[in-house]
Amino acid sequence: MLKLSCVSKIHQAGEVQTTALDRIDLEIDAGEYVAITGPSGCGKSTLLSLLGLLDVPSSGEYWFDGTNVAGWSEAKLNALRRGRIGFIFQSFNLIEELSVFENVELALEYTGMPSREREAKVTAMLNKLGVLHRAGHRPSQLSGGQQQRVAIARALVAGPAVLLADEPTGNLDTAHGDEVMRLLRTINAEGTTVVMVTHSPAHAAQASRTINLLDGRIMVDALRAA
C-alpha cells in the first residue's frame, strides 16, 4: 500500500545540508500496524510526514496505493490525502475556539458531504470513542486523555485507509497513554493501516512490526514474534 524506493530527504539551510533520510527502502502493506522508533533526530517524524504526503522526498520514489506521487504538486497531494490518511499528533492540535463536535466535523468540511450526513458520522464517531457527552465542550475543558480521543475521532471520521500517529501518548500520563494504545490496536484490528512514531519500547512492542531508524537509515525492520 505504501512503498518508498531509495528515498532521501535533505534539508538545506544556507550552505548547510542536513540529511534527514538516507536512501530509504520501505514497504507497508494494507492492514499492518507499524511502529517507527529511534533516537531524537534520527528521521522518524520526517518519514511520517513523507508517508502522510505532508512533505516530498528530495530524491527517490513514493508509491501510494499503486501510484508514484513523488514530484506531485501540493494541491494534488492535498486532494489525494483528503479522506484517505488520518493524523494523530502528540499535541492534539485541536482548535480551542471550536467545540469538540466542530473539531471533528472539520475533517469532513471539504468532502462535499451533506450536513445531515456529517452530523451523523461525527455523532457516531464521538460515541464510539466515548466522548459524545463532551460534544459541546471546548478542548480546554477536557482531560488530556479526552482530548486525544477527540483527536483520534477527527482522524478517523472520514474513514481513512491509513492512520499516522506521531508520539500519540507523549503528552499523556501512563493510564491515558495505555488507553490510547488500546484504541490504536482496536482501530488496526478493524482494518485500518496504522503507522506510529514512538519513543516507548513498550508501546512499540504492541505493533506487529517495528522499524528502527538511526541517522536517517533503517537499522532494524522486524516482525513481532507470534
Image: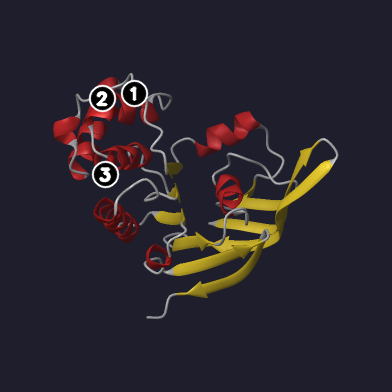
Residue 100 in sight in this render:
no
Q: Which quarter of the figure has residue 191?
A: bottom left
Q: Could one spot residue 101 in this view of the protein?
A: yes
CB contact under 8 Å: marks 2 and 1: yes
Q: Which residue is mark 2?
A: 138
**Dot 2 surroundings within 10 Å: few (below 14), some, or many (20 or more)?**
some
- Where 107 falls versus 7 (above or below)? above
Q: Are marks 3 and 2 in contact (CB under 8 Å)?
A: no
Question: Relative to residue 118, is residue 125 depicted above or below?
Answer: below
Query: How far apart, in angstroms, are the residues tagged by discs 2 and 1?
Result: 6 Å
Identified at 38% across, 67% down, the residue is: 202
Which label belongs to residue 145? Answer: 3
Disc 1 from disc 3: Cα separation:
16 Å
User: Viewer-proximal residue, 31 or 222?
Assistant: 222
Sequence-earlier tag: 3 or 2: 2
Badge 2 marks a residue whose secondary structure is: loop
The structure residue drawn at horizontal position 58% and vertical position 63%, both measured from the top left corner, is: 27
Residue 110 position in % (x across, y down): 43, 24
Which comes sooner in the sequence, label 1 or label 3?
1
The residue singled out by tag 1 in the image is 96
**Which residue, as the protein is rendered here, is positioned at the far right?**
15
* Residue 39 drawn at (x, y percent): 57, 60
Asked if 155 appears above or below 40 in the picture, the reply is above
Q: Quadrant of the C terminus?
A: bottom left
Helix, strand or loop under label 1 = loop
Identify the mark nearer the N-term, 2 or 1. 1
Q: Residue at x 56, y 49 (%)?
A: 45
Element under disc 3: helix
Of residues 87 and 178, which is closer to you in this image? 178
Percent of width and height locating residue 140: 28, 28
Q: Residue at x 59, y 36 (%)?
A: 77
The three-letter amino acid code for the residue at tag 1 is Glu
